[in-house]
Image: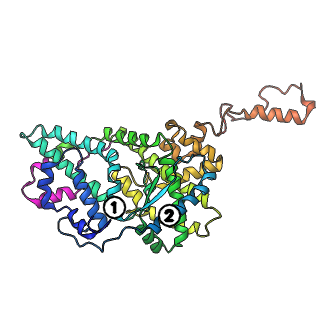
Amino acid sequence: MTEGPGGGADFFGRIPLFREFARLMATASGPVNWELARQVAVATAAGAEDLGMMPQLPRPAAAPDPGEARSWDDRLRLAELWVDPVTSLPAPGVALVARPVNRPDWAEAVLGGFAPLVEPGARRVAEALGTGAGLGPPGVGDMVGRVGGLVAGLQVGTLVGQLARSVLGQYELAMPATDPAKVLLVPENVTDFERSADLPGDQLRLWLACHQVAGQRLLAGVPWLPEQLRRVVDDVALQTEPDASGMMDRLQSMDMANPEALQELLTGGGEGLLGPPSAALQAATGRLEVLLALTAGYALVIAGRALEGRLPGLAAIEAAVGRRDADPQSPARLFALLLRADPDRAAATRGERFCREVLAATDIDGLDQVWAHPENLPTAEELDVPGRWLERVGLIGGEEVDLDEGLRALLEAEDPDRDGEDQGPGTGDQPGDDPGERPR
């Protein structure tokens, strides 16, 4: 970079223009055009409003200074000490090192991690479109595949760039960690959030450090979790039924020599590519939403437990975080949309409610059983009714109790003279009682 990380001159070399689409289509391969995704992500993170022309960029952001990194390292050390007693999930065995970055560099740093999460769905769409294109003139299938890659690349790049403008730290998103020892943070976004929500800066940063440590315990410390996330994403892709004929109709009626027509197709995000969801797709999406909601909610609950009684502004911070998560442009909601999940059903509030109710009925060891094995993950129904999950994993319930027999034994214990007396048939049963009913 000619001006260091975030240098303005280099940004212009990394921004795509729509007149370059012919070159991108000629060199593209695979279900996602990652070169386009990279350029769009960087341009969007840097503040580009219109990718069809040379954007007016904001003043370049300099790389965070080493002193800021050391301050974050100190907060992470403290956060680890505070998180240890409030979760049974072990530390990963590596010293955490903060890596503060600016927005464009965050976008480039994390973009590769999105590949296993978005390529299965993009590949499914590309395969379906290729099949539909096989009925058309020779060469149409290849062209359709390349256009599909551009559509996917633009979608991913735009959303990653938007994420870069609001995400606070890498473990805010349910993404596997490429390096468990490093924690990516975006100080510019932290400062913006602090000011917009009128929060105490030092306390917000301590909360964020605890939140990142809690998220790291999950995404880098639960060995099967990254693979489970990829598995449910693959499941959603497998059950997706693209509307190949609809896309072919759009392509055949479009003037490919007209850049504006291509731009309209791409910026439309490929709307209309997917047919109505089947029951199998809804079930697969439900499992993905459970995983997203639970990981996000758990990190919030653990951070709150770690800081209870330590931060005077904890309630205000948690309230501000809740409002932020409900915003349509929040990182969690954008991430859910990228994975084709319902943002409301994937929301942290849903997972947080589950965690708090389980903790109220048991303790942290009981809650952490959810991370013991993939089979322990709650179903969508159990996430909304935690008592059913508690029963399934054996944390409450057990052998059913016969209340009639229990009452009889209690009365006999209180009145020994009743022993041996003939109580007569049906004693203890009341008219209308169903002896088969048991309390839950």
Q: Is residue 302 left or right of residue 342?
A: right
Q: Give the Cα separation between the discs numbered 1 and 2.
A: 18 Å
Q: Residues within 10 Å of mark 2 (few under 14, many from 20)?
A: many
Residue 75, x across and y down, in percent: 54, 63
249 drawn magenta: yes
- Find numbered disc 2 in the image and state the secondary structure of the residue it sits on: helix
Give amino acid for label 1. Asp
Q: Residue at image x 34%, y 71%?
A: 61
Residue 110, x across and y down, in percent: 35, 54
Give amino acid for label 2. Trp
Q: Is residue 320 visible to us here?
A: yes
The furthest residue to the right: 417
Q: Is residue 41 left or right of residue 397?
A: left
CB-based contact (under 8 Å), mark 1 and mark 2: no
Q: Residue at image x 25%, y 60%?
A: 40
Is the C terminus in the top left, top right, bottom left or bottom right quadrant?
top right
> Which residue is the site of mark 2?
72
> Which residue is the site of mark 1?
105
* Residue 388 vs residue 106, the one in the foreground: 106
Q: Which mark is residue 322?
A: none
Report the magenta residues as a range.
Answer: 248-277
227 drawn magenta: no
Which numbered disc flags the more N-terminal residue, 1 or 2?
2
Q: Would you identify the image quadrant in which residue 5 lies? A: bottom left
Q: Is residue 339 visible to us here?
A: no
- Find numbered disc 1 in the image and state the secondary structure of the residue it sits on: helix
